[in-house]
Image (cartoon, rainbow, N blue to C red):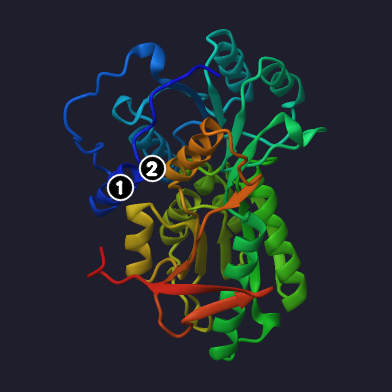
Amino acid sequence: MKKRPVLKPLLTVMIMSLCYLSAGCSARPIDTGPESDIKEDDLVVVGFSQVGSESYWRNVNTESMKSVFTRENGYRLIFEDAQQKQTNQITAIRSFIQREVDYIVLAPVVETGWDTVLSEAKEAGIPVIIVDRKVDVSDDSLFTCWVGSDFELEGKLVCMWMSKFFNLKGIDPNEIHIADIQGTLGSSAQIGRTKGFDDMASLYGWNVAAHEEGEFTKSKGKEAMSEILKKHGNVNVVYCENDSEALGAIEVLEASGRKCGSDILKGETMIVSFDGFNEDARAAVAAGKISCIGECNPMHGPRVESIIRKLEAGEKAEKYQYVTEGIFSDTDLIPTVMISGQERSVTVITERDL
């Protein structure tokens, strides 16, 4: 590993991230003053292969990385947008290897199919850090660390919130007819959130009417919701595996004359979702159209940077690192949700908060 000047203190990165968040997740990195005298050869080179830009969450995740891996902080970031294609990511990783980057960061489209290219990175001596979704490989030494969310737990927590809400409102489980609009099939988020949903729906005795793929996009969410209504007109709860799908589902439901809301005993259709960083989705919560969102924290940049800092210092980093998350809702009826010893706070979103 080439010798470089000491990277800027983590405090600078933390200040940048806090300023970024306070600006509504849309600001560019703050100006930290004139660039240092670090030479190009002294920069830590990071190759980042991102899934794409299919959602607001993904864009925030990308900006979190870009705001941290700057020249001012001692890095050179090579960013590649895979446009939702694994083949593009494999090509990008091989390009990173040829360019002899110091670290590879991968947000994988799907879990499988990575053994060969990650073996090539390992042979080249380049540490690989996986973010967001996981990889299913035959040898977990093919990647150094993983940073992301516990998607199955996310799903279970949202279902637990729904169960508590139904109990408070006196809604019998037999009256629940629920459809799942899934994310990209084979992705970690889809696998985890679907499993969490299926397990809890079975536990609570809910009638699962359908699973339809929505690919984590608004357009596909609309298509999935349209198919569900054609086949299952009695659906009164829609479990969307991200906010973009939820917004698409709302458009279809409202166009069909249905009202989205929590009062399913009066004919409303309850929508629950995941992510929580889409401004339109948060507005939908404040308006009562989305009842609950399981937070999925996209701010992975500082956590990944801290891992690289440790590796640069010759230290070991924890293999799996989960980010902290909560729940957003339109009601204060349920202040917290706990499952398997994990308690998450429920934050009420109002129009004032927007």
Mark 2–mark 1 Cα distance, whole angstroms, equals: 7 Å
Tag 1: residue type? Cys
Please indicate, yes or no, whether residue 231 appears anywhere in the rendered image: no
Rendered location of residue 140, percent (x, y): 76, 36
Tag 2: residue type? Val
Rendered location of residue 128, percent (x, y): 61, 29
Q: Secondary structure at mark 1?
A: loop
Residue depicted at 60% across the width and 43% down the height: 317
Rendered location of residue 292, percent (x, y): 48, 68
Residue designated by label 2:
60
Classed neighbour count for the residue bearing mark 2: other residues with Cα under 10 Å, few (<14), some (14–19), many (≥20): many
Classed neighbour count for the residue bearing mark 1: other residues with Cα under 10 Å, few (<14), some (14–19), many (≥20): many
Pointer 2 with pointer 1, Cβ within 8 A: yes
Count of marks overlaid on the render: 2
**On screen, residue 219 above or below 259:** above
Residue depicted at 58% across the width and 48% down the height: 224
Seen from this angle, which residue lies furthest top?
98
**On screen, residue 11 above or below 349:** above
Residue 341's disc is none
Residue designated by label 1:
25
* Occupied quadrant, residue 290: bottom left
The N terminus lies in which quarter of the figure?
top right
Rendered location of residue 39, percent (x, y): 32, 14
Q: Nearer the viewer, residue 32 or 25?
A: 32
Labels 2 and 1: the sequence-earlier one: 1
Please indicate, yes or no, whether residue 216 appears anywhere in the rendered image: yes
The C terminus lies in which quarter of the figure?
bottom left
Whether residue 18 sits left or right of residue 321 in the image: it is left
Q: Nearer the viewer, residue 1 or 202?
A: 1
